[in-house]
Amino acid sequence: MRDGQCCKSFPKQFNDDTQENVNGYPIYRRRATEPIQVGKYSIDNIWVVPYNPWLLKKFNAHINVEVCASVKSVKYLYKYVYKGHDAASVKIQKEGALDHDEILSFVEGRYVSAPEAMWRLNEFNLSHKSDTVVRLAVHLPQQHPIVYQDGQEAQAIERAALRKTTLTSWFELNKNDP
């Protein structure tokens, strides 16, 4: 709670459909339900946190699930992959002696754990990139999408007849390349 408001924006509003949101988090479908009295509180569907029953059962833990489809989520993940090693600096000295070199302490205080040392000695990659995923423009046969300006419909139809979409090109590739 911050200033009397939930920082996660609860209670949420009722929605008939799931919708995309500007910040990448969807606005989930929430059916209007009858409130239930729990102690002194009246609770309905606007207070339910998104969850995945399969994960709850598998890990026997409270796991909240949110789908995030923004670039911010990728930046967040890579921030921690490339953040660097864990470091600790400890110095024990007699009382009164004060000769502290902060830079030298940092350099000498680097601790490389056994898993990190093994990972670096075997020269394993810190990240992995997989195959590119391309969205195909789906359409029915002979019903290609056409963009045209008024008065230029005939030229647009001729161009569309010659043009290949990502879907038709994919079918053509599969015909020629097993």
Image (cartoon, rainbow, N blue to C red):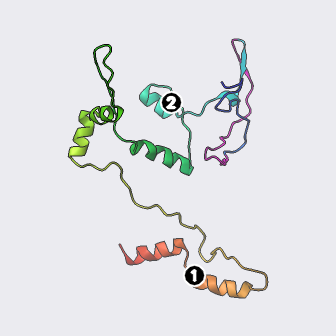
Secondary element under disc 2, as helix, strand or loop, is loop
The answer to whether marks 2 and 1 mark residues whose Cβ atoms lie closer than 8 Å is no
| Of the pair 144 and 96, the residue shown nearer to us | 96
- Location of the C terminus (image quadrant): bottom left
- Taking the magenta stretch, the answer to whether it contains residue 121 is no
Q: Which residue is mark 2?
A: 63
- The residue depicted at 66 percent of the width and 47 percent of the height is 21
Q: Quadrant of residue 112?
A: top left
Rendered-image quadrant of the N terminus: top right
Is residue 35 found inside the magenta-colored segment of the image? yes
| Mark 2 surroundings: few (<14), some (14-19) or many (≥20) residues within 10 A | some
* Residue 74 position in % (x across, y down): 49, 48
- Name the residue type under label 2: Ile
- Front position in the image: 122 or 37: 122
Above/below status of 164 relative to 114: below
Magenta highlight: main SS: loop
Most foreground residue, 114 or 176: 114
Q: Quadrant of residue 162?
A: bottom right
The quarter holding residue 14 reads top right
> Is 55 above or below relative to 177?
above
Asked if residue 147 is positioned above or below residue 42 in the image, the reply reads below
User: In the shown orientation, is residue 146 left or right of residue 134?
Assistant: right
Residue positioned 44% across, 25% down in the render:
60
Q: Which residue is mark 1?
A: 163
Counting residues from the start of the chain, the first of labels 2 and 1 encountered is 2
Q: Which residues are magenta?
A: 19-39
Q: Which element carries disc 1, helix, strand or loop? A: loop
Neighbourhood count class around disc 1 (C-alpha, 10 Å): few under 14, some 14–19, many 20 upward: few
Q: Position of residue 64 (x, y in %)?
A: 54, 32
Residue 30, percent from left and from top: 69, 36
- Residue toward you, 135 or 129: 129
Q: Is 15 situated above or below 7?
A: below
